[in-house]
Image (cartoon, rainbow, N blue to C red):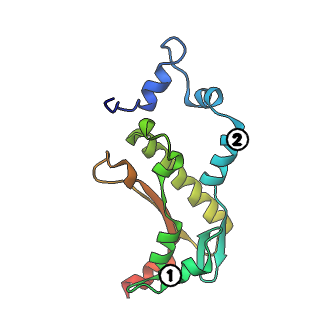
Amino acid sequence: MPHQTPKSMTDELGAWNNGAGIPLETWAECEGNYKLAVGYAALLWPRFEAVGKYILIEGVGKENIESFENQVGSTPKGVEWVLNHWHLADLHIHDEDNLSADKLLFIGNIVKEMWEAKLRNQFPDRPCTVEFCVPDDLDELWDYQISFWQSAWDADEVE
């Protein structure tokens, strides 16, 4: 069976209500469930923790940190970026047929705002930079990523 082009969110919303469409929030109320809401909350508003000099998504093991620190050319910024990065396409690893650039752009921009707010609130004395990486080719859906690092590391790279 040939691969179908996924529906954009505009098409998805417009198909509801006999073609009159519905708002995104109403669609989520109709299509979602509480189990997913709990999972989304954990993914989109993760727990961050200070681990030594790093700020990381909760649960990164010491061995993992050390393996990245020990790589040639490793920097604190690079360690934080790699250990905190998330490929947005991993949100639903079994729903590739519905994956599209417009959805990833929407999610990525919102997650960037959420992580910025949470990091600013949780670590006011350790400002962070949140980066939403959008590929040059918008159809490279597995290349949309988000990550963060402490802004202080940027100064270390200039020296």
Q: Earlier in the sequence, mark 1 or mark 2?
A: 2
Quarter of the rendering occupied by the C terminus: bottom left
User: As displayed, is residue 72 above or below residue 135?
Assistant: below
Spot the residue most to the top: 18
Q: Position of residue 53 (x, y in %)?
A: 59, 83
Q: Position of residue 132 (x, y in %)?
A: 44, 57
Q: Residue at x 56, y 26 (%)?
A: 23
Q: Residue at x 62, y 65 (%)?
A: 120
Q: Which mark is residue 67?
A: 1
Q: CA distance from mark 1 to mark 2?
A: 34 Å
Quarter of the rendering occupied by the N terminus: top left
Q: Which mark is residue 35?
A: 2
- How many callouts does the rendering have? 2
* Amino acid type indicated by mark 2: Lys
Q: Residue at x 37, y 83 (%)?
A: 158
* Amino acid type indicated by mark 1: Ser
Q: Please, what secondary structure does the residue beneath circle 2 have?
A: helix
Q: Which mark is residue 142?
A: none
Query: Which of these two is toward me, 101 or 125?
Result: 101
User: As displayed, is residue 108 above or below residue 36?
Assistant: below
Query: Which of these two is toward me, 145 or 72?
Result: 72
Label 1 environment density (alpha carbons within 10 Å; few <14, some 14–19, many ≥20)? few
Spot the residue most to the left: 137
Q: Is residue 23 left or right of residue 87?
A: right
Q: Position of residue 107 (x, y in %)?
A: 50, 46
Q: Residue at x 61, y 80 (%)?
A: 62
User: As displayed, is residue 122 above or below residue 141?
Assistant: below
